[in-house]
Amino acid sequence: MAARAQIAPARAAAYEVIRRVFEDEAYADRALRSVSEGLDDRDRSLARQLAFGTVQRVRTLDHAIETLGKRPVRKLDPPVLAALRLGAYQLGFLGGVPDYAAVNESVELVRQARIERAVPFTNAVLRRVGDGIERLLSELPEGPLKHSYPDWIWDVWRRDLGEERALALMRAQNEPPPVVVRHVRGQSPDGSATDIPGAYEVERVDEEALARGEIWPQSRGSQLAGLVVGSQPGERTLDLCAAPGGKTTMLAGEVVAVEANESRARELEENVRRLGADGVRVLHADGRDLPAELTGFDRALVDAPCSGLGVLATRADLRWRSQPLPELQLELLRAAAERVRSGGAIVYSVCTINADESEAVVDASGLEVEPIEGWAQFRHPRRPEFLQTFPDVHRTSGFFVARLRAGS
């Protein structure tokens, strides 16, 4: 009996992540954290690249498997499909990986999943994929199939920005974004200062500095939203939907940070402690149903849940589970306005690129828009009173930011 082939630890970890995402609806980043414990830095990095790349490109990979392998993916056993997707990703998108390694270890993953009958099939399909995927990819027309996005995202971006920019956004969010941290305290990070005060582009996150609360991983787009709030010492600020706390811990004065999800509220409390944000009080509650005494705030930040179309580069699985949330966003924005004193400022931000969740929500709120001064490089292309960052233009996550004025 032939000895079983060895499976590289990074491939085994990536395979487990892919299975959890598509079989158990797990979040890719959380699944990776749990399966990569014990891996060294190199293997963990490769596991991330393999898992996130496969999840991200799954629509294109499934097309290649069906076209070249001549078998509908819906008829495949999930463990077999996961191995085929992982192998096809390496064959089609990961330069420097020998074809035999991608094929043989994917076949071995199926064998170790104890689906022996599918071993010859997996081997045959991946060999056909290896022979034909380069040509297949080159001949795909520009659009959501080639770049692996749901049709609805393509439709939204074409509607709002035109076809050329929609394609640029799809390409940009299939590439790893720059690693950016916010300098919280202590020695400045070992990296390059950016156009956002306190934001540094670094090669990697210094885990020791992070543990000491000296830095916080946070994109320039996210930090921009926190800066626009403009909170001052002596003021009271309400922060709805506050977890994990990146923007919360940028706010000065007294801050009430509200988070509806209990586990995320605990995470928020821990991050507030780590970053030394002594003025922040965490409240586990629904932002639409706050205690009556929470009123008269000088400012509010509503960083609302959204489709996340501006952070798809870092959230591998999000494009497959994303949905617009304009009704919830409008409810939260109106709830915040009721808690702010007359004339107080409300900043509304969403990490998306979708007019239905950004300017349309602001317009529906009936609140007075206060044009945002400065930040000319981030001015919204259609509505200059707002800000909008774009991954393809600004090399950061896509954030919409508006500042509004509470009425009497």
Image (cartoon, rainbow, N blue to C red):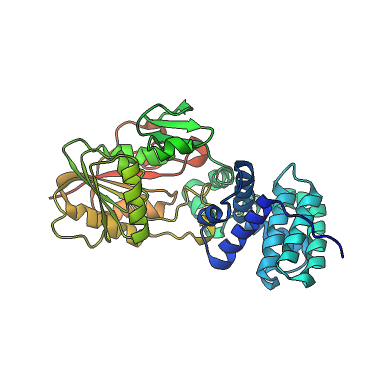
Q: Quadrant of the N terminus?
A: bottom right
**Please, is residue 135 above or below residue 126 in the view?**
above
**What residue lies at 76% left-to-right and 55% top-to-bottom?**
6
Foreground of the two, 95 or 146:
95
**Please, is residue 53 above or below residue 233 in the view?**
below
**Please, is residue 310 above or below residue 284 in the view?**
above
Is residue 405 toward the left or the right of residue 33 in the image?
Answer: left
In terms of image quadrants, where is residue 64? bottom right
How far from the left and from the top, in percent, is residue 373? 29, 33
Seen as rendered, the residue at the extreme right is 1
How far from the left and from the top, in percent, is residue 69? 78, 63
Residue 283 visible in this rendered orientation of the protein: yes
How far from the left and from the top, in percent, is residue 154? 54, 54
Foreground of the two, 170 or 77:
77
**Please, is residue 21 above or below residue 214 in the view?**
below
How far from the left and from the top, in percent, is residue 119? 79, 66
Residue 247 visible in this rendered orientation of the protein: no
Count numbered badges in the picture.
0
Is residue 39 toward the left or the right of residue 109 in the image?
Answer: left
Is residue 288 toward the left or the right of residue 119 in the image?
Answer: left
**What residue lies at 53% left-to-right and 56% top-to-bottom?**
34
